[in-house]
């Protein structure tokens, strides 16, 4: 008898707090999660496991970043439609003192981004790229996306050729096999194309809109974006490797860069 067991990542939702979001560039509401490594039997784990760390997920932009629980007065179990101000009072009352320097910098970004020191501007751009590249690399599988991929695979490699065979068979038995073969090759080519472009499509739909949100207040120049991306390419970060020229031009236009 084969027994499927081992360890897996276990995530537990702990509740909600207020904190600073580097993508929204403001104080926001967050969901707090605990991540641990626990033993499992047939994929089922009944314990929290050894602590790996905690992360906070911004409820506005849905971006996840690491956090430390000791920052918060408490983690509130329920959200109950609380505003950011109310959640600050309940969970992180000294938030403005803790993030004083960053909040002052963000106010400067909003008022006069062009007057910020060039090295600080580059650091802010790189921060956004690092956070979102890490999110893209560690993004969990989406159940709906996985289901769609399975249906596409079945449709293109099995259902499509079968229907082509049956349709051609009604016209002439001679061409039924050829039609099925052509449909199979076309389906296979489509599946390969979709698989090869999956990461690029994910970046464009899930990551680049957040990058625009984060960079728009800074209004980075083309040169600043090129400089930041060049450094990320040395570290083989996903966004830097996958960002195409037309995507870069989109970012320049969307963020008001010059």
Image: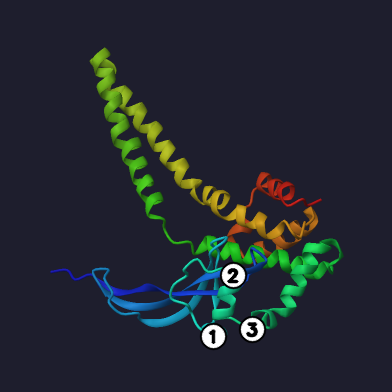
The residue that appears at 57% across and 74% down in the rendered structure is 86
Quarter assignment of residue 182 = top left
Q: Position of residue 15 (x, y in %)?
A: 45, 74
Vertical relation: 145 (above or below) 131 = above
The residue that appears at 72% across and 62% down in the rendered structure is 228
For the residues bearing labels 1 and 3, Cβ distance under 8 angstroms = no
Q: Which residue is mark 1?
A: 73
The residue that appears at 37% across and 73% down in the rendered structure is 10
Q: Nearer the viewer, residue 139 or 68?
A: 68
Quadrant into which the N terminus falls: bottom left
Q: Secondary structure at mark 2?
A: helix
| 1 or 3: tag closer to the N-terminus | 1
Q: Is residue 172 visible?
A: no
Q: Nearer the viewer, residue 114 or 36?
A: 114
Mark 2–mark 1 distance (CA, rounded to whole Å): 15 Å
Vertical relation: 25 (above or below) 142 = below
Vertical relation: 160 (above or below) 76 = above
Q: Which residue is mark 3?
A: 94
Q: Nearer the viewer, residue 45 or 58?
A: 58
In the rendering, which numbered label is found on residue 84? 2
In the rendering, which numbered label is found on residue 235? none
* Structural crowding at the residue carrying mark 1, measured as other residues with C-alpha within 10 Å and reported as few (<14), some (14–19) or many (≥20): some
Mark 3–mark 2 distance (CA, rounded to whole Å): 14 Å
Q: How many marks?
A: 3
Q: Position of residue 154 (x, y in %)?
A: 31, 40
């Amino acid at each position: 008898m084969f027994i499927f067991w081992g360890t897996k990542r276990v995530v537990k939702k702990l509740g909600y707090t207020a904190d600073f979001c580097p993508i929204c560039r403001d104080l926001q509401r967050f969901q707090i999660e605990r991540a641990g490594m626990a033993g499992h039997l047939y994929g089922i784990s009944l314990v929290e496991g050894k602590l790996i760390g905690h992360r906070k997920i911004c409820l506005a932009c849905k971006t996840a970043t690491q956090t430390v629980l000791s920052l918060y007065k408490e983690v509130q179990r329920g959200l109950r439609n609380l505003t950011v101000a109310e959640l600050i009072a309940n969970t992180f009352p000294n938030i403005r003192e803790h993030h004083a320097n960053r909040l002052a910098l963000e106010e400067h970004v909003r008022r006069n981004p062009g007057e910020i020191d060039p090295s600080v501007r580059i650091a802010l751009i790189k921060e956004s790229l690092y956070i979102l590249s890490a999110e893209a690399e560690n993004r969990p599988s989406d159940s709906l996306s996985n289901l769609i991929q399975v249906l596409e695979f079945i449709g293109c490699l099995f259902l499509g050729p079968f229907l082509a065979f049956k349709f051609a068979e009604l016209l002439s038995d001679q061409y039924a096999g050829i039609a099925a073969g052509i449909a199979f090759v076309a389906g296979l080519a489509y599946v390969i194309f979709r698989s090869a472009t999956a990461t690029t499509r994910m970046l464009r739909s899930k990551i680049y809109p957040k990058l625009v949100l984060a960079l728009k207040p800074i209004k980075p120049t083309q040169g600043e974006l090129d400089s930041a991306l060049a450094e990320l390419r040395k570290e083989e970060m996903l966004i830097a490797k996958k960002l195409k020229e037309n995507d870069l031009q989109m970012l320049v236009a969307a963020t008001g860069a010059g």
